[in-house]
Image (cartoon, helix red, strand yellow):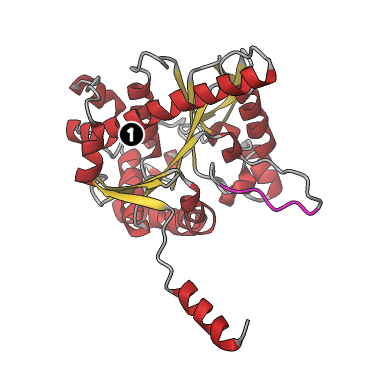
């Protein structure tokens, strides 16, 4: 290739505007609901809303019902693909759970999204059993984090028992009858010893967590190194401007300061007695030195690995939806 041709190729590369996503405005996405029926009532929304995010019927109808319809189609396609593969192999395997990953920053609203999707997906007749777990249960116990000197990096990839999480997902995906996962308490800010949640071959398993889209390191010897999203059939990233998430985090911290933190048994009880200004300053310090750092270094770089990106505005209202092209 001569110099002129090389320069032309480089110029073409620099102007390439292709995106792996098809982006929809809120109104465009809402129309994709088609005739999907509304199966939730106001009372359901009160139970599904988060501490800082009050769900509206409009949000469910315009954003979550189209998502529910899309995921229902994906589940049906995955079930058919599994059946075709089983016929090819001459096997009569039972059903394999469809695994849906939900990723995003601390305080961005992952848990609310996961709960709403669980409620909606469970109301479809062809996949009525939907379970939900968070990867918090696979955090290392505080005693281990303290022993390793990484207590201030809780939530970073190295603070998880990744092998345990991968084994759990492998067992679920292989169709095992009964798989147990550890339980995490936000009140105690630690793993609860001896307590587990049992997953028994659901139709759909929703896995919610900070780093669920984190890729593994490249192998030196060509051997496969699995990572969490290898087990996902579909994944969602909840996105928002970091400055907006900071506001949400501080507001949540201040609300917890007057509620859960007041209990003497709470791990963060010491913050309940702080003056308002001091409490806000502490919340900002935690956000900027831990959670924002984790977002910038580990979470945000995985956004483009998601099947679907939900972009939120400052009021938690989803403003646009990006769906990965097939």
Is residue 218 part of the magenta span, yes or no?
yes
Vertical placement of residue 264 versus 194, above or below: below
Vertical placement of residue 194 versus 21, above or below: above
Q: Nearer the viewer, residue 264 or 256?
A: 256
> In the rendered view, does 124 fall on the left or right side of 85?
left
Residue at image coords 51%, 33%: 233
At mark 1, the secondary structure is helix
Q: Nearer the viewer, residue 218 or 82?
A: 82
User: Mark 1 sits on what residue?
Assistant: 67
> In the rendered view, does 287 fall on the left or right side of 259?
right
Q: Residues within 10 Å of mark 1 (few under 14, many from 20)?
A: many
What stretch of residues is rendered in magenta? 214-220
Q: Specify the quadrant of the image occupied by residue 269.
A: top left
> In the rendered view, does 208 fall on the left or right side of 36?
right
Is residue 170 part of the magenta span, yes or no?
no
Which SS does the magenta portion mostly show? loop
How far across and how far down the image is residue 46, in percent? 24, 25
* Viewport quadrant of the C terminus: top left
Residue at image coords 62%, 17%: 87
One can see residue 54 in this view: no
Residue at image coords 33%, 34%: 67
How far across and how far down the image is residue 191, in percent? 58, 30
How far across and how far down the image is residue 117, in percent? 36, 28
């Amino acid at each position: 290739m001569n110099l002129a041709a090389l320069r032309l190729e480089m110029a073409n590369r620099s102007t390439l505007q292709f995106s792996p996503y098809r982006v929809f405005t809120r109104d465009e996405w809402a129309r994709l609901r088609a005739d999907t029926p509304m199966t939730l009532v106001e009372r359901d929304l009160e139970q599904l809303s988060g501490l800082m995010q009050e769900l509206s019927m409009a949000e469910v109808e315009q954003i979550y019902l189209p998502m529910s319809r899309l995921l229902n189609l994906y589940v049906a396609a995955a079930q058919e693909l599994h059946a075709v593969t089983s016929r090819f192999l001459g096997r009569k395997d039972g059903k394999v759970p469809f695994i849906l990953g939900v990723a995003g920053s601390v305080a961005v609203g992952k848990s609310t999204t996961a709960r709403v999707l669980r409620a909606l997906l469970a109301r479809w007749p062809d996949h009525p059993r939907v379970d939900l777990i968070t990867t918090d249960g696979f955090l290392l116990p505080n005693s281990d984090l303290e022993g390793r000197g990484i207590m201030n990096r809780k939530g970073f990839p190295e603070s998880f028992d990744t092998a345990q999480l991968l084994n759990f997902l492998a067992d679920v995906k292989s169709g095992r009858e009964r798989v147990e996962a550890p339980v995490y308490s936000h009140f105690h800010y630690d793993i609860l010893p001896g307590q587990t949640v049992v997953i028994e071959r659901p139709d759909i398993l929703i896995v919610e967590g900070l780093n669920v889209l984190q890729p593994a390191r490249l192998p030196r010897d060509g051997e496969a190194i699995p990572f969490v999203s290898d087990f996902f059939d579909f994944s969602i990233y909840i996105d928002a401007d970091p400055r907006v998430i900071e506001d949400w985090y501080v507001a949540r911290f201040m609300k917890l300061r007057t509620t859960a933190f007041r209990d003497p048994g709470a791990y963060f009880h010491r913050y309940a007695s702080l003056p308002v200004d001091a409490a806000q300053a502490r919340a900002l310090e935690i956000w900027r030195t831990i959670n924002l750092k984790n977002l910038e270094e580990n979470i945000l770089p995985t956004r483009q690995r998601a099947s679907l990106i939900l972009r939120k505005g400052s009021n938690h209202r989803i403003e646009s939806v990006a769906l990965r092209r097939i």
